[in-house]
Every structure is written in C-alpha cells, then in structure tokens.
C-alpha cells in the first residue's frame, strides 16, 4: 500500500527540513516505546513516523519518494545513509530523556564518536545559591557545522559508500587456525567505521563537520547547590569530528563568601551585636536574611549565650523535597571600648548593685553544648 510520509508526519509537501525534523521529534516524543510500554498502537505510530522521517530527512531518498512514492523507493536498502540518519537522530534526541535510545540499539559504533567534555567553574553568591538562578556563560567550543549538518560533506550530501568495506564500516576476514576457520571483524581503517567516504568536503568547515565558536550558553542552577557540586549540561561540550554526539559541559560550583551570613550546611549563621543595655532592657532589632530583612524581638534579660532560630530562613536542601534550613542568630553583647567621664560615673554608681553581680545558671554553662545541638541532625 502506498504510504503518505508527509501525512504521517503531519507536514505539507513543501515543508522545510527543519519543519520535518520538528514534526518527527514531536511524534517520536509522544509515541516513543519507552513512554508507552506495551502500547502496540503507539509503537506502530512511532515506527511509521521513524520510517517517514528516515526518507524525508534524506535528500536523495526524499527526491526518489517524491517522484515515485513508496513503490519506487524500496525502503530498506541499507546504505551509508543510515549513518547520517543516525547522527541526525542523536542530535535530535540529545536533550530528551531517551537520548541514548538510538545509540544503544542497532549500531553502537557511532557512540564511539563522542566529543570531549568541557569544564568550567562558576562562582555564585549566597542569594543565587539559596534562590536558584539562571546563568549565561561564554564558552569556546566546537559546535556541529550547520552547512553540512556535521558530516563534513558539501551540503551534507556529497558522500559515497566506502569501497574497501562496502559501506559496512567493518572488514570481515576468515583466518585459518588450528581449530578451523575463524571469522574476525575489524573496524574499517579507511572510513574509521563510518562506512562512508566524503566526495567533496564541506567548504564551510573544510570537512571537519564542526566549527570552533564562542557560544553563549544559558542554564539553570537549582536551589541549594554546594561548593564543588557539578552540573552536567549534556550536548554542550565539544562536537566531535564529522558527526556523532557532542560531549557535555560540566559546570563546577564555587561559592562566594558572604560578609554577614555564613553558610553551615543548609543553615545560615548570623552574629547580632547588641549593647548590654539593649539585652538587659529588651529591644527589637533588624536582622538580614537571604530573603530580606526581618525584625527580631529580644526579650529583657537575654544572655549572650542565647541563639535565636529564624525558621525556614536557611537554604533549601537540594535533595530534600522542599526541606529548608534555618537561620541561627547568635547574640554578641557589645562591651564599650571607650567611656566618657559621665558614662564612667553612671556605671560606677551601678557597680555595687546586687543585680549586676554575676549569678550564672546552668543555661550559661552549657553554652557550647547548646551550639553543638544546633548542628546535629
Ligand atoms: Zn560543514
Ligand atoms: Zn570503510
């Protein structure tokens, strides 16, 4: 039966390569077998779309199909085109959850052709760490050449079958051994396993299939990242020579010190300096947090061993289902360094007063135990 590949992909007959790719990607995402386990109808749709894309994404096959339809085009003649097709699919699925589907399947030799990973280190301030952020970085890297689609051949089409391996990518040899004839298989050295040979090199990339460019890469940093943690941006590393899968860009996190707010795990520590008059009489003070200023009530008679907990003002745990740290406010009583004559006289008049004679209780003695308790669990 005659198949209408355009209809299967839901595109017009004059659709551009980009539109065809987009349409196929949409269908493939929806009906992918990994997403629809056991669903025969979905599998059929996926297969039909893949067949349609196989033909319509290849200029030669498309031309033949447009002229003669499926009866003229025999479909499964396994030629070098498969490799170009596979390269295309790899890059089509490179940021999808089933990125490895095509490379794990029928032809593994393509996966060997993967570009190198690149590494960068970025410095984040405390707000960025706590709230998450979007970063833009300039990275010098190899990207796939657009003119040839990455295969290094003029217009991506000037390719012919590798003669020594007959387009198989491997050379089989029968060797006679003591145990009889043995069939050995080796990757073809003429085409390094691709099965194809370039007739005319792409003039844009001189046949490399890639170009060295300064690329602006935007990515999201999730809440709660830590120093030396690594984010892997798949496909944002170097594109390999002549098609294949680009490597990853590995982003290592560095944290900028904050002058006031110190991170301890997911908690934030802050030291509040209060005059001994204010802690004695009680007061209300402004305290900075990652999420803006909050007012903290300090009750009369607060001792310098007091730690106030601002619940949920810490950092969101990166693995923890919305779990959040707290901000701990440590009270530091300020002792005046200089006194006027009058101030000194006032203090002297209080010196003998019974309420000013230290009477430490259990609470004060266990100051360090208390601090420790904040960092447990
Ligand atoms: Zn090129
Ligand atoms: Zn070969």
Image (cartoon, rainbow, N blue to C red):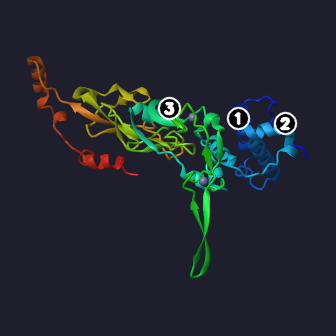
Is 165 displayed left or right of 121 in the figure?
A: right
Residue 72, quarter of picture: top right
Of callouts 3 and 2, which one flags the residue occurring earlier in the amino acid sequence? 2
Counting from the top left corner in percent of width and height, residue 360 is at 21, 44
Query: Is residue 107 shown to the viewer in this render?
Result: yes
Q: CA distance from mark 1 to mark 3?
A: 22 Å
Counting from the top left corner in percent of width and height, residue 181 is at 62, 76
Instruction: Single out the mark in the foreground, 1 or 2.
Output: 2
Residue in the foreground of this view, choosing between 295 and 105: 105
At a point 59% along the width and 32% down the height, the residue shown is 146
Does dot 3 land on a helix, a strand or a loop? strand
Of callouts 1 and 3, which one flags the residue occurring earlier in the amino acid sequence? 1
At a point 70% along the width and 52% down the height, the residue shown is 34
Residue to which mark 1 is pinned: 22
Does dot 2 land on a helix, a strand or a loop? helix
Does dot 1 land on a helix, a strand or a loop? helix
Residue in the foreground of this view, choosing between 234 and 364: 234
Is 57 displayed left or right of 367 in the figure?
A: right
Q: CA distance from mark 1 to mark 2?
A: 24 Å
Can you tell me whether the CB of the residue at mark 3 lies under 8 Å from the nearest atom of ligand 1?
no
Instruction: Single out the mark in the foreground, 3 or 2.
Output: 2
At a point 45% along the width and 33% down the height, the residue shown is 139
> For the view shown, which residue lies furthest in the right direction?
1
Picture quarter with ligand 1: top right
Is 82 displayed left or right of 249 in the figure?
A: right
Residue to which mark 2 is pinned: 67
The crowd level at tag 2 (other Cα within 10 Å; few <14, some 14-19, many 20+) is few
Per the rendering, the mark at residue 217 is 3
Q: Label 3 near label 1: C-beta < 8 Å?
A: no
């Amino acid at each position: 039966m005659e198949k209408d590949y355009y209809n299967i992909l839901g595109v017009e007959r004059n659709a551009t390569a980009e539109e065809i790719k987009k349409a196929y990607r949409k269908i493939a995402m929806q009906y992918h077998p990994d997403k629809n386990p056991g669903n025969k109808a979905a599998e059929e749709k996926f297969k039909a779309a893949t067949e349609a894309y196989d033909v319509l994404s290849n200029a030669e096959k498309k031309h033949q199909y447009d002229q003669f339809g499926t009866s003229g085009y025999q479909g499964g003649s396994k030629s070098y085109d498969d490799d170009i097709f596979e390269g295309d699919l790899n890059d089509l699925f490179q940021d999808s959850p089933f990125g490895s589907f095509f490379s794990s399947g029928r032809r593994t030799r393509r996966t060997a052709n993967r570009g190198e990973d690149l590494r960068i280190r970025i410095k984040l301030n405390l707000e960025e760490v706590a709230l998450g952020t979007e970063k833009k970085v300039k990275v010098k890297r190899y990207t796939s050449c657009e003119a040839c689609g990455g295969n290094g051949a003029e217009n991506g089409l000037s390719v012919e079958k590798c003669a020594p391996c007959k387009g198989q990518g491997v050379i089989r040899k029968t060797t006679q051994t003591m145990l009889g004839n043995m069939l050995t298989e080796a990757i073809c050295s003429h085409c390094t396993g691709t099965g194809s040979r370039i007739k005319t090199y792409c003039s844009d990339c001189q046949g490399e299939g890639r170009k060295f460019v300064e690329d602006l890469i935007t990515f999201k940093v999730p809440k709660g990242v830590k120093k030396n943690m690594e984010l892997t941006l798949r496909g944002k590393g170097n594109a390999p020579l002549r098609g294949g899968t680009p490597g990853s860009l590995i982003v290592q996190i560095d944290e900028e010190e904050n002058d006031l707010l110190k991170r301890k795990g997911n908690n934030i520590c802050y030291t509040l300096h209060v005059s001994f008059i204010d802690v004695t009489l009680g007061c209300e003070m402004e305290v900075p947090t990652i999420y803006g200023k909050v007012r903290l009530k300090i009750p009369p008679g607060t001792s310098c061993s007091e730690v106030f907990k601002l619940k949920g003002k810490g950092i969101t745990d990166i693995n923890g289902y919305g779990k959040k740290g707290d901000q701990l406010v440590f009270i530091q009583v300020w002792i005046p360094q200089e006194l006027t004559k009058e101030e000194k006289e006032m203090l002297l008049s209080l010196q003998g007063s019974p309420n000013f004679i230290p009477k430490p209780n259990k609470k004060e003695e266990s100051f360090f135990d208390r601090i420790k308790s904040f960092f447990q669990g």
